Image: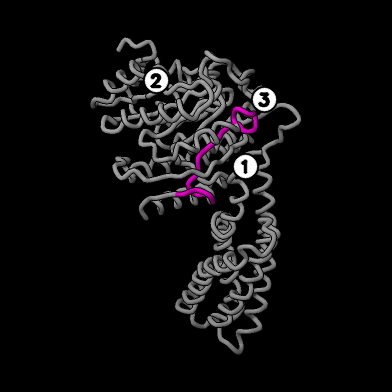
Amino acid sequence: MTNPRAVVMPEQDRDKESGPGEDDGPAHRESVLPRRAPIPLPLPGSPPVLDLVVPVLNEEAGLERGVRRLHAHLRAHFPYPFRITVADNASSDATPRIAVRLAEELPEVGWLRLEEKGRGRALRAAWARSSAPVLAYVDVDLSTGLDALLPLVAPLMSGHSDLAIGTRLAPGARVVRGPKREFISRGYNTLLRSTLAVGFTDAQCGFKAVRRDVAERLVPLVRDEGWFFDTELLVIAERAGLRIHEVPVDWVDDPDSRVDLLSTALADLRGIVRIGSDLARGMLPLASLRRGGPEQHPDRHAPQLRSQLIRFAAIGALSTLAHLGLYAALRPAAGAQTANALALFLCALANTAANRRLTFGVRGRGGALRHQARGLAVLAVGLALTSGSLALLHHTAPDAGARVELVVLVAANLAATLLRFLLFRAWVFGTGAHRRRTTGPTGR
């Protein structure tokens, strides 16, 4: 283990390399980032422009095959100097020996050894010690097609974007995986959109890049050391107004994946609660991540969300009044349950159309039928809540009058409003809203 490109990082030294800029003082943390500028094209023999990290834990079976394939692709198709860093986080099999041998045989390959587990920990350490202007990582199984690597890096080198991510959930992506993983992935990203109102489409794809000047300030703000590292990184970047470029990728599921889905899911849920709480309390110094110059805009994420909430609430108030009026008109002839269902159905159609145009800014006829169909699915939630409330009222108080029924319906509608907004934002109109971002920035 004497290769000059090899580093063994004991735990007591890891904190020293947890991220450049972490201890640079309040003035550094509060000053804005300079305007983005293109990365100068390197001359022959220049240091690497790209440092591509491959985080590994007990990957003796696929490490050599993955690194050699990655190295061959970069040599053949990547036009700039590069480095591949194998970041071993506490492997207990033959992974370290294989990494050493690869670093000795391949001139662009180095390796890093950490004594503690954690993919986030490995990326943090590898990126902190790199001087390359573009930092990236890929999973060792290379599930993501490598043809997307240059499109991933190009917008960072040109000065167009601050971060770039591969996405398996955008138009143009070609994905082969089982229904279980498809459901988990889509469910997780839907949860992110509905709870943290994120704009990027795929937080978990192991194919990401970031400019080093951004990483120096962004990574120290990320607290997670495991699988949630990616999500936390992107959420903070987006809330700070950094520009995130998305690249649709070809992706084939690795059937030999040994990720513990249950423990990872629970850790992700804890991470969502934590980062959501930090953002709500203003605990993160987002100002230090904003760009200077005329291109910089304040964080428009929160104002956009507030604007949507205001429009949604106004439309919802009008819909509630219309629903109550229709219910009162229909009840004498149709009965309580039928009148409620008919009033809710008619108001749902109008509500979906109004929110489509006024709240979420979707224009044209494209997808209108799909949006109405999904809106009717959301109607089922409202119908279950309101009808269930009426049924419970009639069971507990059979002699309740029309005024009491109206009060119960108002309460049920208010209870359903928040859930309805989240479903509209994340599902009903979420696909159309995100489609506009798939080949461009999600940041501002």
Task: List x then y, in percent, for residue 393.
Answer: 49, 75
Name the residue at 60% across, 68% down.
369
Quarter of the C terminus within the rendering: top right
Image quadrant containing the N terminus = top left
**Which badge, 3 or 2, comes first in the chain's sequence?**
3
Q: Amino acid at mark 2?
A: Val
Place of residue 115 in the rendered image (x, y in percent of width and height, measured from the top left): 32, 21
Is residue 339 shown to the viewer in this render? Answer: yes
The correct choice, above or below, for 414 with respect to 217 in the image is below
| Residue under label 2 | 109
Which is more toward the observer, 148 or 229? 148
Residue reaching furthest to the right = 294
Left/right placement of residue 197 relative to residue 71 reads: right
Q: Secondary structure at mark 2?
A: strand
Q: Nearer the viewer, residue 157 or 75?
A: 75
- Quadrant in the picture for residue 343: bottom right
User: What is the secondary structure assignment of the residue under circle 3?
Assistant: loop
**Circle 3: is it few (<14), some (14-19), or many (20+) Cα within 10 Å?**
few
Residue ID for mark 1: 440
Q: Which mark is residue 37?
A: 3
Q: Is residue 112 left or right of residue 300?
A: left
Q: Nearer the viewer, mark 3 or mark 2?
A: 2
The alpha-carbon separation of the residues under discs 1 and 2 comes to 32 Å
Camera-nearest label, 1 or 2: 2
- Can residue 10 be seen in this snapshot? no
Q: CA distance from mark 3 to mark 1?
A: 18 Å
Above or below: residue 45 compared with residue 417: above
Name the residue: 43% across, 44% down.
Answer: 251
Identified at 41% across, 54% down, the residue is 183
Asked which secondary structure carries label 1, the reply is loop
Left or right position of 221 against 71:
right
